[in-house]
Image (cartoon, rainbow, N blue to C red):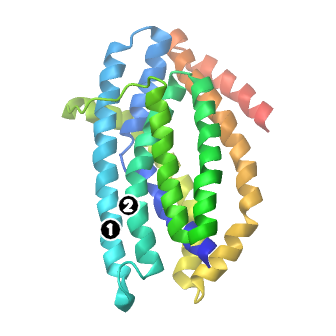
Amino acid sequence: VQMGIWQGLKVALSYPNYANLGERKGAARELAVATGRGALDRAERGLNLAFTVNTLTSLAYGAALVGGAFWLRGDSGLLQNAWSLGLLAMAMLVVLQRHLTFHVTILRCRQAFGLTSWVSIGEGVLTLLLAGFGAWRWGLPGLYAGTLLTMAGTLAFLHWQGVRPFRPDWEWAEIKRLVSIGGPILLGGVALAVFQSLDKLMLLSFSRERAYELGCYSTSLLITAQIYGLANMFAIVVSPRYAELFGRTGSPGDVARRAERASELLA
C-alpha cells in the first residue's frame, strides 16, 4: 500500500518538468548551439530568464499540490490522511527538484558530464542512506524527509563545486522566443509522460483498492524502468552534441546522420 501511495505521488512529481512551457528546453538548446558557434552572451541571458520562469512555475505547481492536499484531507485531517500528507511533501519536493534539475540540465549542455556523473552517484548514495533509513524507520513520512534532505544535499554539493547561482530576470520577448524553440520539444515530452503514466492513472481512478494494486503493479515494473534508464543515460550524453554540431556546421544533414548512427548503436 505504501508503495502504491509513493508511486501515485511520483506521478504528480513528474509533471512539473513540463510546466515551464518549454522555456528551459529552449534555453538549453540555445546554449548548446551557442557553444558550437562560440557566442555565449545571449545564451547566458536566456539561462537567467529560463531559471526565473522555472522557479515561478514550480512554485505555482507546488501551490496547486497544497490545494489538492486540503481537498483530499477528508474527515481524518490534513496530516492524518496519507494522500494529503504526501501531496504536502510533494509541494516542497517539486520546488527543490525543479531547481536541481535545471542546474543538472545546464551542466549537461555544457558537457560537464564528469560533474553530473558525480551528482548522480552522490544522489544515489544519499537516497540509499537517508531515504532508505527514513522509510525503514518511519515509513512514508521518513521517505519524504529523506528525499528532501537528499535533494538539499545534492544542491549543496553543486554549490560547493562552484556551480554559480542564476539571477532572476525577465523579458517577455526573449521568453516567448525561447518558448517557441522549446515548445515542440516539450509537447513530445508531455505526450510521452502522459502515455507512460496512463496505466498508473487508470489504477488510481478506477481501482477500489488503488493504493494496494498500484503498489503491486509498480513493484513488477521496477526492472522495466531500469531498462528504459539505459536509453536515457545514452541520450543524456549525445543530445547536447547534436545541438553543438548544428551550431558549428549549420547542417541539419550532419546532425541527422549522427542521430541515425547513435540510434543504430542504441538499438
Q: Amino acid under label 2?
A: Ala
- Name the residue nearer the viewer: 136 or 158: 136
**Where residue 105 appears, x then y in whole percent?**
49, 34
Residue in the image at 65% along x and 52% along y: 128
Q: CA distance from mark 1 to mark 2?
A: 6 Å
**Where residue 22 appears, x then y in whole percent?**
39, 41
Residue found at the very far front of the displayed protein? 137
Where residue 202 sits, quadrant-wise, is bottom right
- Kindly tell me whether residue 30 is visible in this rendering: yes
Q: Give the structural element (helix, strand or loop) at label 1.
A: helix
Residue in the image at 55% along x and 63% along y: 143
**Where residue 221 appears, x then y in whole percent?**
72, 64
Label 2 neighbour load within 10 Å: few <14, some 14-19, many 20+: many
Q: Is residue 169 above or below residue 10?
A: above
Where residue 88 sits, quadrant-wise, is bottom left
Q: Give the structural element (helix, strand or loop) at label 2.
A: helix
Q: Is residue 26 above or below residue 10?
A: above
In the image: residue 245, left or right of residue 148: right
Q: Amino acid under label 1?
A: Val
Q: Which mark is residue 152?
A: none
Which quadrant holds the N terminus? bottom right
**Where residue 176 appears, x then y in whole percent?**
27, 36
Determine contact: label 1, label 2, CB under 8 Å. yes
* Residue denoted by label 1: 66
* Residue denoted by label 2: 91
- Kindly tell me whether residue 8 is visible in this rendering: no
The first of marks 1 and 2 along the sequence is: 1
- Name the residue nearer the viewer: 204 or 90: 90
